[in-house]
Image: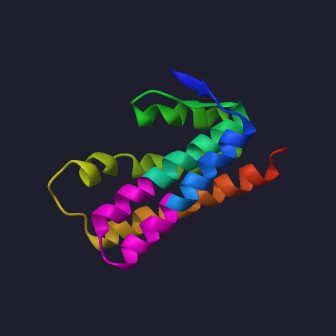
Amino acid sequence: MRTRNVSAAQARSYLAKADEYLAAAENELAEERGIAATSLAIHAAINAADAVCGVRLGKRAAGQDHDRVGELLSEAGRDGDELGRDLRRLLPMKTKAEYDPDDIPLSAAAKAVERAQRCVSVARRVVASAPR
């Protein structure tokens, strides 16, 4: 698996991106735009995973296959496992949200946003515990 080194400052930047994507996902859900909410939620979770892997392992997955990030998360301890459970449920929705012509029901979008909220919460906890 290809990886890239991640500094503490970069891990904080990934968390900031995760927070921004999550806020946007929540806004889109409130406006009943399920496709955008789901896509943004997935990106929030991916950036949260990069933040956790960056803090715990000093690296993040760098390949095109987002499913491989689960391997790194499993090396990141309990926090990685916790985040990985939700990320594994979000990633299969990525293609549907971003490329398929079908709509995403608001109930599925709401579940995606909830999962992203948990992922970002884990990342916030991990980044806050990291030495500066």
Tell me which secondary structure the magenta stretch mostly adopts: helix
Going 54% across and 31% down the picture, which residue do you hit?
71
**Is 32 on the left-hand or right-hand side of 16?**
left
**Is 17 on the left-hand or right-hand side of 30?**
right
The image shows residue 101, relative to residue 106, as above or below, that is: above
Going 52% across and 36% down the picture, which residue do you hit?
70
Q: Is residue 18 visible?
A: yes
Total numbered circles: 0
Is residue 37 shown in magenta? yes
Q: Position of residue 13 (x, y in %)?
A: 63, 47
The colour scheme applied to this rendered structure is: rainbow
Q: Position of residue 113 (x, y in %)?
A: 45, 65
The image shows residue 37, relative to residue 18, as above or below, that is: below
Is residue 49 shown in magenta? no
Q: Quadrant of residue 34?
A: bottom left
Going 57% across and 44% down the picture, which residue do you hit?
49
Q: Is residue 77 visible?
A: no
The boundaries of the magenta stretch are 21-42
Going 51% across and 35% down the picture, which residue do you hit?
69
Indicate the quadrant containing the C terminus: top left, top right, bottom left or bottom right.
top right
Q: Quadrant of residue 26?
A: bottom left
Extreme-left residue of the structure: 101
The image shows residue 110, relative to residue 76, as above or below, that is: below
Extreme-top residue of the structure: 1
Q: Position of residue 117 (x, y in %)?
A: 54, 64
The image shows residue 48, relative to residue 29, as above or below, that is: above
Extreme-right residue of the structure: 131
Q: Between 108 and 54, which is closer to the camera in this rendering?
A: 54
